């Protein structure tokens, strides 16, 4: 059994709970350098998508995939959509906040962009809204992001940041 297979098997065999949760996070961190291996990426996708999974392991996967999005277009689309699905209001609030701030590299996908737009304009959690705005800024200037920021200029919470960004992008 190679190292990635061993780490995936160890993750899957680890029970949740304080010690098990910490062990899961450590395994995720070890897998970070192996994301070009489809088994590692598949585990990250599974962990992120599972609301019953240990929250800190889910957050760590999301953080890593924000900084190291998959190179392949299909994997990038798949991972972006999985992270975007975490914005569901029924999911854990902290996982949602991290997901909202991690979608910038995936915003070219219309499904992901729509999820960002929905979160930034109307999520009940103000931190999710702020973090989704960060993803909009990270996605960079284009017609869609400019239109979304224009829509936010009158928003009492995000209007100043939207206006400032539009000014900077001119």
Image (tube, helix red, strand yellow):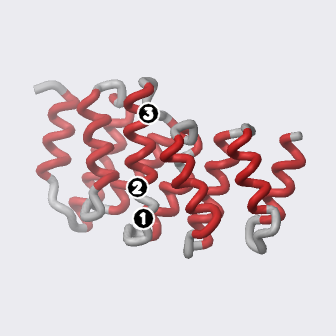
Q: Are marks 2 and 1 in contact (CB under 8 Å)?
A: yes
Quadrant containing the C terminus is top right
| Image location of residue 159, percent across then percent down | 80, 65
Q: Quadrant of the N terminus?
A: top left
Mark pair 2, 1: CA separation: 6 Å
Residue 81 figure quarter: top left
Q: Residues within 10 Å of mark 1 (few under 14, many from 20)?
A: few
Q: Label 3: few (<14), some or many (≥20) within 10 Å?
A: some
Residue for point 43% across, 62% down: 95
Instruction: Please tell me whether mark 3 sits on a helix, a strand or a loop.
Output: helix
Secondary structure at badge 1 equals loop
Q: Residue at x 38, y 67 (%)?
A: 91
Rendered position, 165 above or below 92: above
> What residue would you read off at disc 2?
85
**Which label was assigned to residue 76?**
3
130 is higher (above) or lower (below) than 43: below
Q: Quadrant of residue 51?
A: bottom left
Q: Is residue 166 above or below residue 40?
A: below
Residue receiving disc 1: 88
User: Above or below — where is 19 with respect to 32?
Assistant: below
Cα separation between marks 3 and 2 = 14 Å
Query: Image point 50% across, 47% down: which residue?
Result: 112
In-front residue for pair 14/114: 114
Q: Residue at x 23, y 62 (%)?
A: 19
């Amino acid at each position: 059994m190679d190292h990635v297979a061993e780490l995936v098997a160890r993750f899957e065999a680890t029970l949740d709970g304080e010690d098990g949760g910490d062990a899961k996070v450590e395994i995720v961190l070890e897998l970070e350098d192996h994301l070009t291996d489809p088994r590692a990426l598949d585990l990250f996708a599974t962990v992120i998508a599972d609301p019953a999974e240990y929250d800190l392991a889910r957050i760590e996967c999301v953080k890593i995939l924000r900084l190291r999005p998959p190179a392949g277009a299909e994997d990038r689309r798949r991972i972006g959509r999985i992270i975007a699905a975490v914005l569901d209001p029924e999911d854990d609030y902290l996982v949602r906040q991290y997901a909202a701030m991690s979608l910038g590299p995936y915003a070219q996908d219309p499904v992901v962009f729509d999820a960002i737009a929905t979160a930034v304009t109307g999520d009940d959690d103000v931190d999710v809204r702020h973090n989704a705005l960060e993803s909009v800024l990270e996605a960079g200037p284009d017609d869609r992001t400019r239109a979304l920021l224009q829509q936010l200029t009158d928003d009492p919470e995000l209007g100043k940041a939207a206006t400032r960004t539009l000014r900077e992008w001119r």
